[in-house]
Amino acid sequence: MRFRSIRGTAVTAALCVAMSAQLTQPVLAAPEKSGEPRYSAGSASVGDPYFPNQGNGGFDVQHYDIAFSYDPATKHMDATTTITALATQDMDQFNLDFQGPEISALSVGKHPADFRRDGQELIVTPRPKVKVGETFTVTVKYAGTPPVITDPDGSIEGWVPTDDGAFVAGEPQGAPSWFPGSDHPTDKATFTFHATVPEGLTAVGNGQLLSKTTKDGRTTFVWDSTEPMATYLATVTIGNFQVNETKTSAGIPVYTAVDPRLVSQSAATVARIPEIVDYLSSVFGPYPFASTGAIVDRAPNVGYALETQTKPIFSSSPSLGTMVHELAHQWYGDSVSPTRWSDIWLNEGFATYSQWLWTEHTGGITAQQTFNNSSNYGRAATSAFWQTITADPGPVDMFGSVPYNRGAMTLHALRGKVGDAVFFPLIKGWAAERKFGNASTRDFIAYAEKTSGMDLTNFFDVWIFQKGKPTTW
Ligand code: ARG
Ligand code: ZN
């Protein structure tokens, strides 16, 4: 789903092409008759160089309905995913991204469709064909064990079995492990999950819990994620969880699910979620989603946390700093998402900078002191750290220290350059202007220049486009 003006433009542009074809067709010779659709295959990817198979063209996903049962004892999933999408061209073929288990049936609308699989590509031949402007559904039935995905940096993601269920996280390429879709942050959609698990376990998804019903020893949890979400932020994590519900002072529901083995270690951090969300709202503007919370799971082989939308997920007991980081991503990363993965510093730089601000806010060292320290500007000019380009770290280093630390340093240096009176409205305005959308590094620079009235070419050159330790900016 492309929201606001972007979404309107995509569809309008496609319709305009169709309409102008209609107007000019009569003067053109056969083969095609006036106004007839011109069918072709939707693109197999959106062309992001970090993950060249991700995303698809020819349609725009509006909604995912993902229904499954999962048994941790056998690691068996039985699933039906229905995608509702809007066609942006006339299509006789389109692709989805899927790495999941065997497909037993696939239909487009009511009609069974032919399909074949080639790596992560699921290639569908809809009959009847799909016309531009049409809203259509794709229903995929599949069963088996979803695969664990290994990333360029060696970390694992996707559907990761744990000793009591599954830890589910998808950045940057894990979503196709457990549901078919258009797996790129530029195609956001709303989601509904229906997860059936053995009675006694809890399935925790993004958004709000609509219902929980138990029958014949199995419990179905229905979660509704009502704001647009990038596929990499989707989760339905399963396990033994101690659930707690509260509210922030602004009335935002807070749902936390903590592995009972981690309750005592993580209680102090989890209890501060409302206070953290309140503080971040005061700096970044209103919290973007209808609910918040956290999932604290035990997944020692994962070893990282992820800002899964509305409920960040942790693979062990989180530090306070990590909790702040993942909650800050709700604004920067989740609500405002990267246009290309090379823009990842816009996610990680903001989330890291929010930790610096929180530390200062709670009486620790100042953001300036953090900027100066040995993990940041205090690194020697000869350090390899300065040799990765912040705005293009590559798929191996996209979650390395540069997008995080040099990204945060960039924001702090920008604050120094434009002054607090410009900087804080700038970061708030950015979150508001791009809410539920996507933005690139170039978009951010343009916004910073417009807001500050300054030419920031050299500033961003030395901080994010060039190698080397910046000395003047
Ligand atoms: N965005 C996550 C965090 O900072 C990190 C995800 C790392 N993922 C991975 N596959 N290595 O907060
Ligand atoms: Zn992060």
Image (cartoon, helix red, strand yellow):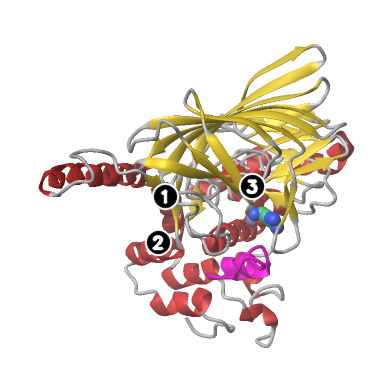
Compared across the picture, whether 154 is left or right of 9 comes to: right
Picture residue at 82% right of the left edge, 19% below the top: 199
Which SS class for mark 3?
loop
Determine whether the beta carbon of the residue marked 3 sits less than 8 angstroms from the nearest atom of ligand 1. Answer: yes
Question: Is 352 drawn above or below residue 250 in the view shown?
Answer: below
Please tell me how crowded label 1 is: few (under 14), some (14-19), or many (20+) other residues with Cα within 10 Å. some
Question: Is 216 drawn above or below residue 264 in the view shown?
Answer: above
Picture residue at 14% right of the left edge, 49% below the top: 28
Q: Quadrant of residue 369?
A: bottom right
Determine the CA span between mark 3 and mark 2.
22 Å
Q: Which residue position is annotated with label 3?
A: 307
Q: Which residue position is annotated with label 1?
A: 434
Q: Which residues make up the magenta segment?
A: 391-409
Residues marked 2 and 1 touching at CB (< 8 Å):
yes
Q: Which residue position is annotated with label 2?
A: 443
Quadrant assignment for the N terminus: top left
Compared across the picture, whether 15 is left or right of 260 comes to: left
Image label count: 3
Please tell me how crowded label 3 is: few (under 14), some (14-19), or many (20+) other residues with Cα within 10 Å. many
